[in-house]
Image (cartoon, rainbow, N blue to C red):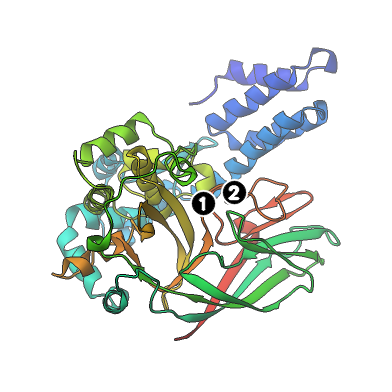
Amino acid sequence: MRLSLLTTSIIIILLFQSCRDKPDATTLFGILENEYENGNFQKLPQLLDSLKIRFPEEKGLIRMADSLTQISERISLDFSLTEDQFIQRIEAYNIPVNDSILGTWDLKKWTEWRFIDGQKRYYRRSPSNLRLLKLFYENRENRDIEKSRNPESLARRKHTEEIIAASDLTLNPVCPVSITVNYTIRVNPDVVPEGKIIRCWMPWPRNDHPRQQKTEFLSASEKNFIISPDSMTHRSIYMEQKASAGSPAVFSVSFRYQPSAQFINPEYLKPETYNKESSLYKKYTREEPPQIRFSEDVKKLADSIAAPGDTPFETARRFYLWFKENIPWTGALEYSTMPDMPAYVMEHRRGDCGMQTLLYISMLRYRGIPARWQSGWTVFPDHENLHDWSEIYFEGTGWVPSDITYDLQASDDRTIREFFISGIDSYRLILNNGISGSLYPEKIHLRSEPYDFQRGEVEWEGGNLYFDKWDYEISLEYEK
């Protein structure tokens, strides 16, 4: 929506009239918020500066205005393609496109764009997402055949067969692997003034989970560092370094750890009734707004899939199979720009691992089944990546891994085919046992990733350093 010339003139008058007639802080923040909602992002820094100069005592409003300004910058980075660039990339996939087809894709919500500063801008991953959506909805059989034959799928299926064979009634973790991790963050030169302290949090493995043990510190770039306790939601190693003019600030850490796989055969799950008075049950069946909540749409969807008389596992299985039929994986917007990811998945019928997992957890909790977030990295050889999944609690059994975005495997054996409903491979790096926790030591400024922690976080006294201000690199060495 464009503001009229009259409205724009009024705003300018409000901002630059004398101190005697200046708007109050709430009015000025409202103007900034309105510009944000209308996609007029270039105006936000000036409005933020005005708020800081005129009302330095309004710390709360300044913090909210600063957050909106930062989020607008993140949205602009995500929505970086012009329409011509979007079309060129679509045509590179040999997908025909014209105005009519564009309109059809818009109606199906297969494309993603918004007006920013008066220009139509497409999401940078919209071309590749469109290709994935067309394969899922228009050529799924061939897509599934191709996926089942690719080297990663074949290796993973072989690995899951080994896990199933090694698992027994004890339900203990199996197939341990020793992995050495070398992780590096490089902060771009001169993004922080010389001599100022750069604060950096990097991934560190949890050691409070049966599937992940024997963490061993090997080295770090800084002599002084702080490893957060396992009691924190997000596990990290913290370091500081002074900025040097013209040079990147390089933080690195090396460690070794032992992850394991786990498979719980559904036939071994004890159909015990939940103790609804336990603290565990209450904690993991409650809402955690804004990303885990029981909206009317979540309730309606969950109730339409679940069946009367189902056991908790049968309900989870129904949900999992529904996702496989209806929700393809696609690349995601940065989570910090998404106020309600489950709602997005339901509306757009797509999402990445974290988005789908949040909807899955919301549905399970609403139906009275304890579920929690778990995330970090998948470190399958030659296919390492950020990844999110979940765990479901079954009374009498305990926590059971469940990975909603891993597909059904190509096999006539149902146990192999549905492995990831109640199983997980050995190649995970667990960093988080929940969402939206505090870092340790606590971060001062708005986090780059407010819900999860995988790549790391960086800041200085002047503000957060977003992902475009630094790079990360992970290298892995395996020993069975």
Q: Is residue 133 shown to the viewer in this render?
A: yes
Q: Residue at x 61, y 55 (%)?
A: 232
Q: Amino acid at mark 1?
A: Gly
Q: Alpha carbon of mark 1 to alpha carbon of mark 2: how far?
A: 7 Å
Q: Residue at x 15, y 62 (%)?
A: 141
On residue 434, the disc is 1
* 217 left or right, relative to 413: right
Question: Looking at this rendering, what residue extends furthest in the right direction?
Answer: 195
* 48 left or right, relative to 206: right
Of residue 478 and residue 215, the one placed in the foreground of this image is 215
* 136 left or right, relative to 195: left
Q: Amino acid at mark 2?
A: Gly
Q: What SS does tag 2 mark?
A: loop
Question: Looking at this rendering, what residue extends furthest in the top direction?
Answer: 21
Q: What SS does tag 1 mark?
A: loop
Q: Is residue 44 above or below residue 89?
A: above
Q: Residue at x 54, y 45 (%)?
A: 336
The location of residue 202, given as percent across then percent down, is 64, 64
In the rendered image, which residue does mark 2 sit on?
A: 437
Tell whether label 2 touches label 1 (CB within 8 Å). Answer: yes
